[in-house]
Amino acid sequence: MIVVVGCGNPNRLDDGAGIEVLRMLEARDVCRDAQGVRLLAAGTDGMATMFAARGCRTLIVVDACRSGSEPGAVFEVPGNELEQRYAASLNLHDFRWDHALFAGKKIFREDFPSDVMVLLIEAETVDLGMGLSPAVSAAVVKVAERIGELIQARLSERRATS
């Protein structure tokens, strides 16, 4: 199973980039011929990301970021480089996908994927509002295409080893 998780808040302009990538993948029907591919719009719910990843072989996370780079820049990073230990608080609203990667490995052990890829799109603005900036909109198209390539590569590898 391949799970693609789109993260972000579409009510915060470019922060909705991950959710928009998922919409594009759904519109392109990437799962139609790819049995064993699941798309999940997790929003800002890190727990949903962690539980969606349980039992899958490949996890792809897509989200917006604020690194100071040019808006629309795309970063493709192995998940193990971004996972972070969660510091417990009185609520889980701050339990993000990077915490989910760390906690999922600790909780689910071998039932958590080791093949984790994260695609991040540099946001121009995360102010309140709907819609994406032009630079982020263009990056969403590129990231959706890249995720399609990643899915096809993983499915081809599995067919070759079956």
Image (tube, rainbow, N blue to C red):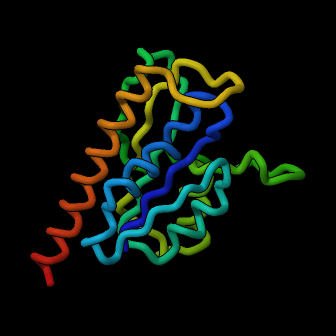
Above or below — where is 32 with respect to 29? Answer: below
The x, y position of residue 104, in whole percent, is 57, 65
| Closest to the observer, 148 or 26 | 26
Query: Seen in the image, is 90 located left or right of residue 62?
Result: right
Above or below — where is 161 with respect to 43? Answer: below
Query: Seen in the image, is 25 located left or right of residue 55?
Result: left
Q: Quadrant of the C terminus?
A: bottom left
The residue most toward the left is 160
Query: Seen in the image, is 24 located left or right of residue 52?
Result: left
Residue 56 falls in image quadrant: bottom left
Residue at left offset 37%, top offset 41%: 77
Residue at left offset 59%, top offset 69%: 51
Residue at left offset 85%, top offset 49%: 89
The x, y position of residue 84, in whole percent, is 59, 47
Q: Quadrant of the N terminus?
A: bottom left
Residue 48 falls in image quadrant: bottom right
The residue most toward the right is 90
| Closest to the observer, 34 or 106 | 34
Q: How many marks?
A: 0
The residue most toward the bottom is 162
Residue 146 falls in image quadrant: top left
The x, y position of residue 31, in whole percent, is 33, 67
Residue at left offset 68%, top offset 27%: 129
